[in-house]
Image: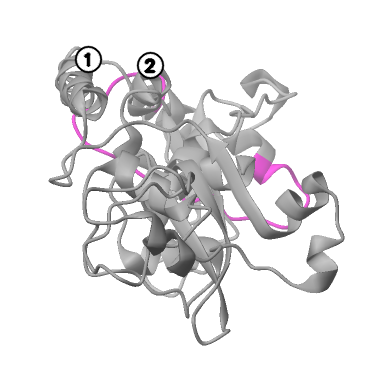
Amino acid sequence: FDEFKKLGLTHYVGGYESTSTGRLHVQLYFQFKQRMTYKKVKEMFDDHPMTFPEKLYGNSDENRNYVMKKYNRCKVHSSCKCDYQDLDQICELCDETCKQSRTLSRWSEPWIENLNEDEKQKLVGVWEFGDYRFLTANGEGDKEISELKKDEFNALTEASKDLVDGMSPIEIFKKYHNRITTWTSNWFSLKQIAIELQPKIEYVSTFKPENFEISEIMQKWVNENLNQKQDRYRSLLVIGEARIGKTKWARCHGKHIFWRSEKNLEKWDVEAKYIVLDDITWNDGTLINLNQT
């Protein structure tokens, strides 16, 4: 049950029943944290042949009692309301003779009857898990559900204010994740949250700019474009033989975004001072020898 609970199931009750044709089937009643489509329920239990009634009749107590019934209703009156658990509690339509037409609803075989009560219950039911809550007959949630929806709306309003005040999206998620369940209702959102929650491992260079010997024009470019704020973005193309320290030099000037061979926008960092593009393919433009400029 704990695995299904993570997917939104809050209550589950059911058991095996025998039909008048002798065919075995399972009668179940579910409650979820929020409304679910038939398709979603089938996918949750990996049971695509599962069928559903067009609508539930009565409130949740009546439907739960029906699933948990020990006896079927009598065959004499179509509107029989006799008690599902006690043969002696008969409705106003029935009399003592009606009890003779009432049959046991649970699946029963000679070998099952030889089991003890605990073994029977585990095999046949009734099984019940989770926290049951009363739901009214019109299909709307009870007061508890209404309060949860109201609280979720209030949390969304508060989260919007926090975003305007400068709080990051992941900080907002951590603050309100217990109150706003819709944030994890689809795969894209869940994946993005998982990415954001991964611990950020910041690159720390083992070198300092003064550890490198560079040309005057390169040092001038660094002073004017990295060490001072500019009104527009500028680029520096560094060309040279492999293993001479180009990348290490480029990565020692402060907080930066590092892309090797291809761009990955998922690794974007708004606090970065600059971007290093390593091992790029240059097919356009004029290559300039900076030492001769």
Of the image marks 2 and 1, the number of the one nearer the N terminus: 1
What's under tag 1, amino acid-wise?
Asp
Q: Position of residue 116 (x, y in %)?
A: 85, 49
State left or right for residue 3 relative to residue 48: right
**Which label sits in the foreground, 2 or 1?**
2
Residue that label 2 marks = 175
Of 144 and 194, nearer the camera is 144
- Quarter occupied by the N terminus: top right
Tell me if label 2 and label 1 are in contact, CB under 8 Å: yes
Circle 1 sits in a helix, a strand or a loop, which is it? helix
State left or right for residue 203 relative to residue 93: right
Callout 2 crowding tier (Cα within 10 Å): few <14, some 14–19, many ≥20: few
State left or right for residue 269 relative to residue 104: left
Magenta part of the chain: 226-247
User: Is residue 237 visible in this depiction of the protein?
Assistant: yes
Task: Place residue 199 in its image quadrant.
Answer: top right
In the rendered image, the vertical position of residue 97 relative to residue 66, given as above or below: below
Q: Residue at image x 52%, y 69%?
A: 281
Of 281 and 3, nearer the camera is 3
Q: Position of residue 171 (x, y in %)?
A: 39, 20
Tally of numbered tags: 2
Of 115 and 40, nearer the camera is 115
Q: Is residue 270 rendered magenta in the image?
A: no
In the rendered image, the vertical position of residue 286 relative to residue 83, given as above or below: below
Q: Residue at image x 71%, y 50%?
A: 121
Label drawn at residue 96: none
Q: Position of residue 176 (x, y in %)?
A: 34, 20
Q: Is residue 236 rendered magenta in the image?
A: yes
What's under tag 2, amino acid-wise?
Lys
Residue that label 1 marks = 162
Q: Main secondary structure of the magenta part?
A: loop
